[in-house]
């Protein structure tokens, strides 16, 4: 409505007025119209934002993330490959003329077909190999679930943290604006020197710049969250204080999806060993012919069967088998490495949780309450003239640091919990 009706109407009104105004008046009207346009644009951007919970964000990501489309295509491709396991070599048609001699230059003209097949066990081994690859892509969905949940929660709680930082800056802005007004009044009435007024204004301007920077950080984090959610909507957390995440219970049989994928790589490598063993088996071929195909009255009909043995390629076949066996050892070593890595990362993230939890005990116990008391008492004392600006600024800095450090500790705690919950996912 704003774009289609209000803005064009405003433009027409101001454009008609400008015809009777001076150039200076035209410039002012144009600037005013520009401000209105910017305001309307800001309103439309804000209206596109929605507030959601962490569970809603994860749900949207699990439904919309493009990685699932890629995984579905990989599963379909692997499923189609399993149907190629019983691929039979092409059937040949041959024409030959043999038994020619001077008394019978025409010889015996023959037409027939020929077919070769590999060792029957090879087809079974290939199908097993393709089925193991299919299982890998099917298991990969569980891995995607775990990774996407971790990424979405990380982006969401980081955004929530920045939102709370913005609330803190807003509260501080109110304090310093009030402080600046008080300092300015005391300066005008001659109760304080001009330095106090300048310092208060400088701190107020600095805080406003920090608020703008935090708003930009929020915007960037919203873009990051929308990327994971595959959405054009810029989401915001619920308009409540940042919540502390809960630890998930450690499963009795903990086997992370990443480790399950690596275990499946071992099964794929083992299936490949059977393929290489069957490659070393004989191949069969046969053909059948008959002169009846082109109308001979007394046709010659016959067949032949051949078996092909890997006589001269044994060294190469043996090397392929050894290579496949070595691949199994590599994948097993990789699994052991990942298990040790996951165990170390789980312990590390849990240690980070304990460290942050110790700090949160203080802040949640008396720290935040003391910060609020320092804020209020310092402001009242300053307005009453009991303390000067420098003393009040020191008290404010102490209280601000408590508030900031609490948010930092809470954010670090949540980030560590997200990582820990990811590592222990069954």
Image (tube, rainbow, N blue to C red):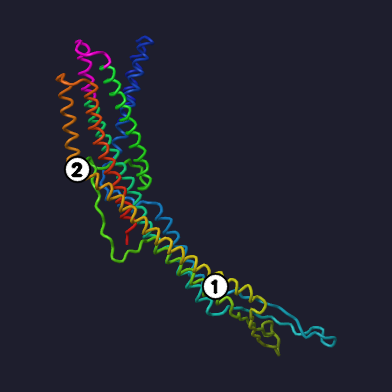
Q: Is residue 274 above or below residue 359?
A: below
**Which is nearer the eye, 33 or 302?**
33
Mark 2 or mark 1, earlier in chain: 1
Label 2 to label 1, Cα distance in Å? 68 Å
The majority secondary structure of the magenta stretch comes to helix
**Residue in the image at 44% along x and 59% along y:** 73
**Which is nearer the eye, 373 or 230?**
373
Q: Position of residue 415 (x, y in %)?
A: 31, 48
**Which is nearer the eye, 302 or 254?**
254
Q: Position of residue 233 (x, y in %)?
A: 33, 42
Looking at the image, is mark 2 or mark 1 nearer the viewer?
A: 2
Q: Give the quarter of the image for residue 169.
A: top left
Q: Is residue 251 above or below residue 298?
A: above
The numbered mark at residue 364 is 2
Q: Is residue 414 above or below residue 328?
A: above
Residue 347 among those drawn in magenta: no
Q: Secondary structure at mark 2?
A: helix
State which region is magenta: 176-195
The residue carrying mark 1 is 87
**Residue 157 falls left or right of residue 134:** left
Residue 184 among those drawn in magenta: yes
**Residue in the image at 63% along x and 76% along y:** 314
Crowd rating for badge 1 (residues with CA inside 10 Å; few <14, some 14–19, many 20+):
few
Q: Is residue 121 above or below residue 132?
A: below
Q: Position of residue 4 (x, y in %)?
A: 33, 30
């Amino acid at each position: 409505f704003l774009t289609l009706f209000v803005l064009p109407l405003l433009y027409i009104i101001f454009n008609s007025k400008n015809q009777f105004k001076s150039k200076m008046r035209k410039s002012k009207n144009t600037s005013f119209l520009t401000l209105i346009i910017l305001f309307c644009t800001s309103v439309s951007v804000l209206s596109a934002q929605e507030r959601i919970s962490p569970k809603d964000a994860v749900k949207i990501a699990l439904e919309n993330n493009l990685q699932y489309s890629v995984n579905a295509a990989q599963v379909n491709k692997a499923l189609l490959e399993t149907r190629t396991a019983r691929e039979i070599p092409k059937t040949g048609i041959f024409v030959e003329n043999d038994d020619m001699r001077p008394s019978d230059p025409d010889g015996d003209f023959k037409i027939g077909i020929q077919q070769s097949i590999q060792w029957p066990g090879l087809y079974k081994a290939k199908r097993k190999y393709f089925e193991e690859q299919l299982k890998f892509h099917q298991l990969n969905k569980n891995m995607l679930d775990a990774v996407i949940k971790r990424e979405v929660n990380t982006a969401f709680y980081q955004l929530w943290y920045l939102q709370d930082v913005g609330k803190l800056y807003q509260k501080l802005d109110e304090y310093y604006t009030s402080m600046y007004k008080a300092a300015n009044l005391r300066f005008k009435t001659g109760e304080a020197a001009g330095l106090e007024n300048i310092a208060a204004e400088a701190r107020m301007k600095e805080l406003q710049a920090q608020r703008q920077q935090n708003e930009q950080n929020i915007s960037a984090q919203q873009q990051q969250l929308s990327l994971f959610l595959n959405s054009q909507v810029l989401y915001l957390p619920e308009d409540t204080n940042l919540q502390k995440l809960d630890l998930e219970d450690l499963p009795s049989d903990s086997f992370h999806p990443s480790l399950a994928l690596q275990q499946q790589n071992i099964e794929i490598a083992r299936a490949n060993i059977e393929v290489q063993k069957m490659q070393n088996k004989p191949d069969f071929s046969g053909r059948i012919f008959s002169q009846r195909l082109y109308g001979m009255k007394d046709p010659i009909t016959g067949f032949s069967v051949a078996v092909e043995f890997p006589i001269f390629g044994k060294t190469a076949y043996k090397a392929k088998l050894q290579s496949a066996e070595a691949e199994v050892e590599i994948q097993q070593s990789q699994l052991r490495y990942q298990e040790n890595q996951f165990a170390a990362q789980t312990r590390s993230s849990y240690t980070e949780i304990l460290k942050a939890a110790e700090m949160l005990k203080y802040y949640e116990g008396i720290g935040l309450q003391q910060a609020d008391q320092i804020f209020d008492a310092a402001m009242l004392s300053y307005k009453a003239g009991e303390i000067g600006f420098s003393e009040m600024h020191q008290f404010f800095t102490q209280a601000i640091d408590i508030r900031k450090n609490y948010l930092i500790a809470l954010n670090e705690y949540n980030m560590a919990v997200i990582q820990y919950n990811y590592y222990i996912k069954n």
